[in-house]
Image: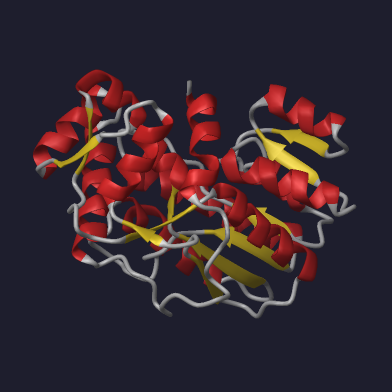
Amino acid sequence: MGATGNVGRKIVQGLLAAGEPVRAVGRNERVLAELAAAGAEPVAGDAGDAAFLTAAFRGADAVHTMLPYSATAPDFRAEQAALGTAIATAVRESGVRKVVAQSSLGAELAEGTGFIAASLHPHERRLRALDGVDVLLLRPTLFFESVVAGAAGVEATGVYADVIAPDVPVPMISTRDVAAAAVEALRARDWTHGEVRELLGPRDLTYPEAARILGAAMGRPDLEYVQLPGAEMAAALVQAGFSPDTAALQVEMGEAISSGTITPQGGRTHRNTTPTRFEDVVSELLEEAS
């Protein structure tokens, strides 16, 4: 699933490079055509359609699942519950026995984490309840892409702004490292049901540090980070196209990161530390976003 997205496309490419047969499931037909030209079997359809997903999953040795995200959803929880139910139904009905589920750091918490509590916490519980299916929960931290998404605001205001306190170190990760972990797991299929693997990126960065790296790539080496009050951040997000519901959830998630509520459960280890630095990919991400 998610074969045409930031992580999923890289998973497909990694599996194909390793000589694995891949069924690429997504909605962007242009990207699916590119993946088909590279050797994947393209399957286009609606991620909320359990019958479609069941057919797409059937016969697979292992499946990568993810919950599609919409910042404009008027009722994010309801939308995510419907999508998650379709995924769980498809896993059960298709007969697949190995599933890698893309989740998030903090998904063990039932409340207070914004998007994560509204979506991934209940979805992890939904998948854990499946009988006879070995589910691996990949929990990456904040994506570098999420940081780069703030570049549009920089152009408008001259500063980088968010709700996260400037002195809080935050683990951040490249989607290429998330995809690499998924590829490794899908090929090995060596996990037990409900196993959790956190992915923390190469090092923690404060938001002022991340802003300086971003600013250097944008030709703004002195880019300043400004912490916004939650209400002001929510209003800015709504102006940028978020629904009021998703804006509030985004702010709550940021505040949970800032307070230390969302934190690695196992600390930083060699296994969960990944290699790609923000400096390595920031220019590429800016080009993709432009």
Instruction: Name, please, the residue furthest toward the front.
Output: 221
Residue situated in front as seen by the camera: 276 or 49: 276
Residue ID at (43%, 62%)? 203
Q: Dividing the picture into quarters, in which one does residue 132 lie?
A: bottom right
Q: Is residue 149 visible?
A: no
Q: Position of residue 137 (x, y in %)?
A: 55, 67
Left or right: 235 in relation to 26: left
Residue situated in front as seen by the camera: 192 or 50: 192
Q: Position of residue 124 (x, y in %)?
A: 48, 65
Whether 274 is drawn above or below 28: the answer is below
Left or right: 248 in relation to 284: left
Residue ID at (58%, 55%)? 178
Q: Dividing the picture into quarters, in which one does residue 138 lie?
A: bottom right
Q: Is residue 245 visible?
A: yes
Whether 63 is drawn above or below 31: the answer is below
Residue ID at (84%, 39%)? 40
Residue situated in front as seen by the camera: 287 or 77: 287
Q: Position of residue 2 (x, y in %)?
A: 62, 42
